[in-house]
Image (spheres, grey):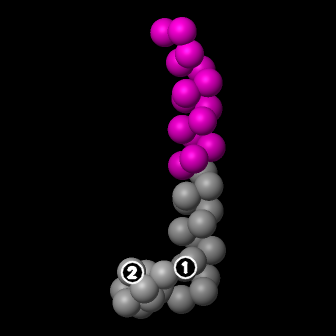
Amino acid sequence: TPALTSRGFVEEDFVKVAEYFDASVNLALKIKSESKGS
């Protein structure tokens, strides 16, 4: 969190970062599952 708070992030920003992180992981898992055997 120091890397974010030192850049002026507030609680609402942390929620957005978590949403982006979750979306990224889910997208990576989807791509990985669709590319098996290719």
Per the rendering, the mark at residue 3 is: 2
Q: Secondary structure at mark 2?
A: helix
Residue that mark 1 sits on? 13
- Along the horizontal axis of the image, is 17 left or right of 5? right
Q: Please provide the residue range marked out in magenta.
A: 24-38
Q: Residue at x 59, y 20 (%)?
A: 34
Position of residue 37 relative to residue 4, above or below, is: above
Q: Amino acid at mark 2?
A: Ala
- Whether the magenta-drawn stretch holds residue 35 is answered as yes
- Measure how far apart labels 1 and 2 are at the Cα level: 13 Å
Crowding at dot 1, Cα within 10 Å, few <14 / some 14-19 / many 20+, comes out as: few
- Whether the magenta-drawn stretch holds residue 2 is answered as no
- Residue 7 lies, in percent from the top left, at 37, 86
Q: Residue at x 57, y 77 (%)?
A: 14
Q: Amino acid at mark 1?
A: Asp
Determine contact: label 1, label 2, CB under 8 Å.
Answer: no
- Residue 24 lies, in percent from the top left, at 54, 49
Q: Residue at x 57, y 47 (%)?
A: 25
Q: Earlier in the sequence, mark 1 or mark 2?
A: 2
Per the rendering, the mark at residue 25 is: none
Position of residue 13 relative to residue 29, above or below, is: below
Q: Residue at x 37, y 90 (%)?
A: 6
Question: Is 9 or 32 nearer to us in this picture?
Answer: 32
Q: Quadrant of residue 31?
A: top right
Check the image and name the residue furthest to the top.
Answer: 37
Q: Quadrant of residue 3?
A: bottom left
- Residue 4 lies, in percent from the top left, at 43, 81
Q: Secondary structure at mark 1?
A: helix
Disc 1 or disc 2, which is closer to the eye?
2
Crowding at dot 2, Cα within 10 Å, few <14 / some 14-19 / many 20+, comes out as: few
